[in-house]
Image (cartoon, rainbow, N blue to C red):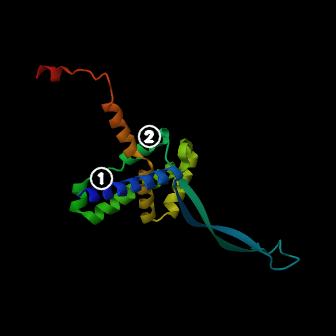
Amino acid sequence: MQENQAQDMQAMEAEKKELRLLIGQGISFVVDYHEDKVVRIPRFPRFQWLFPKKRVVREEKQVEFIVKEPTAFTLDRLSLEYVELAMDEACIKSNPRQEARKLFAKHNRRMARIVAIATLGNDWESEKLLSERTEFFSRWLKNSTLWELVQAIDLTNNLADFINSMRLLSSARTTIPNRIESQED
């Protein structure tokens, strides 16, 4: 029994160590996209300026983004976006497909915005930069990838350690006030 408990503790410690490493280094992901460019093709050597031929060429590109542990400033903004992802479970149970479509239409850009805020870090204050990045992610990321990234961002927020440290600090207070309600008992 103690061996099982020791193995469980070792597994938990290994998971914590891996999580801290992940939070410290950040999570990187690559977005594949393409750009269309208009290219002029010369047709007649002497009169190419008179009769230009144009062709659209598609260039495949990739961009790598890194999500690191956010600062408290960015975490406040992310929390504000997370709170807006409210759903009514009763409506989902009564009509799952229709409600799923409504929720997708309502929250798809918000999830792209969450990923944009996380990748920008403290630079999310620039509304222009934030809207460009949000538009980029909503255009080029698949829904499954977007959902995985939002979950990974939630993981990098490191809220569990924050809550645990608050619990430790609140229990370690030396001057806990005596409440009137507890004195009457």
Q: According to the image, label 2 marks what residue? A: 76
Judged left or right of residue 59, residue 121 is left
Query: In the rendered view of the protein, which quadrant contains the C terminus?
Result: top left
Residue 91 lies, in percent from the top left, at 24, 57
Disc 1 versus disc 2: nearer the observer: 2
Judged left or right of residue 173, residue 34 is right
Judged left or right of residue 53, residue 60 is left
- Mark 2: few/some/many CA within 10 Å (<14, 14-19, 20+): few
Q: According to the image, label 1 marks what residue? A: 87
Residue 77 lies, in percent from the top left, at 45, 42
- Mark 1: few/some/many CA within 10 Å (<14, 14-19, 20+): few
Label 1 and label 2: CA atoms lie apart by 21 Å
Q: Vertically, is 46 above or below 74?
A: below
Residue in the image at 53% along x and 53% along y? 25
Q: Amino acid at mark 1?
A: Met
Q: Amino acid at mark 2?
A: Asp
Q: Identify the residue at the far left of this view.
A: 185
Residue 142 lies, in percent from the top left, at 46, 65
Residue 59 lies, in percent from the top left, at 65, 70
